Image: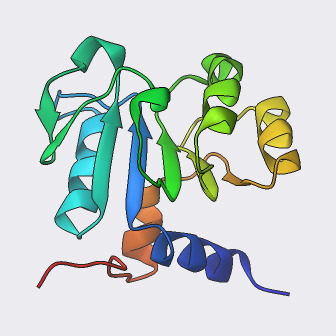
Amino acid sequence: MASEDDRLREILMESPTIAVLGIHTAPEKAAFYVPEYLHDEGYRILGVNPGLAGKTLFDQPVRATLAEITERVDLVDVFRRSEHLPDHVEDILAMEPRPTYVWFQLGIRNDAAAQILEAAGITVIQNRCTLADHQRLGLRAPTARP
């Protein structure tokens, strides 16, 4: 059986395109500096935040909803409070194709939402930071730019 670190390594290495639900523009907020780090490491970041829709972040237009993303997303990185996660489950399940992974950032946990997503075949990580795990594991992005 694979270790937790092996599982995290696999997820991060198999996810070149990441939708960031709840992306932010304030540099001091994790919802900005985490996707910024991932972008700088070579990941393609697709921001989702209705309040920022139409702005450009990390070379991509910010979408108001996950439904506006028309391309394959490998991982949905969630920066929304735990109590808001049930509101996003249907949106995640409606994505075509569905993401392989959903990652609830550090401090975010909702077992009921995770259970529904996992029952649909989506791997869910809860209460972990993509930036911290990426650095700790010494990873490079799967599509790192030269």
Where 22 falls versus 19 (above or below)? above
Q: Which image quarter: residue 25?
A: top left
**Quarter of the rendering occupied by the N terminus:** bottom right
Q: Is residue 124 left or right of residue 80?
A: right
Where 9 falls versus 71 (above or below)? below
**Quarter of the rendering occupied by the C terminus:** bottom left
Front residue of 108/23: it is 23
Where 125 falls versus 42 (above or below)? above
Q: Is residue 18 left or right of residue 40?
A: right
- Which residue sits at x=51%, y=46%? 76
Q: Which image quarter: residue 23?
A: top left
- Which residue sits at x=61%, y=49%? 102
Query: Residue 87: x and y, percent?
Result: 65, 17
| Res. 34 visible in picture | no
The total of numbered circles placed on residues is 0
Query: Residue 130: x and y, percent?
Result: 45, 58
Q: Is residue 98 left or right of residue 9?
A: right
- Which residue sits at x=38%, y=81%? 139
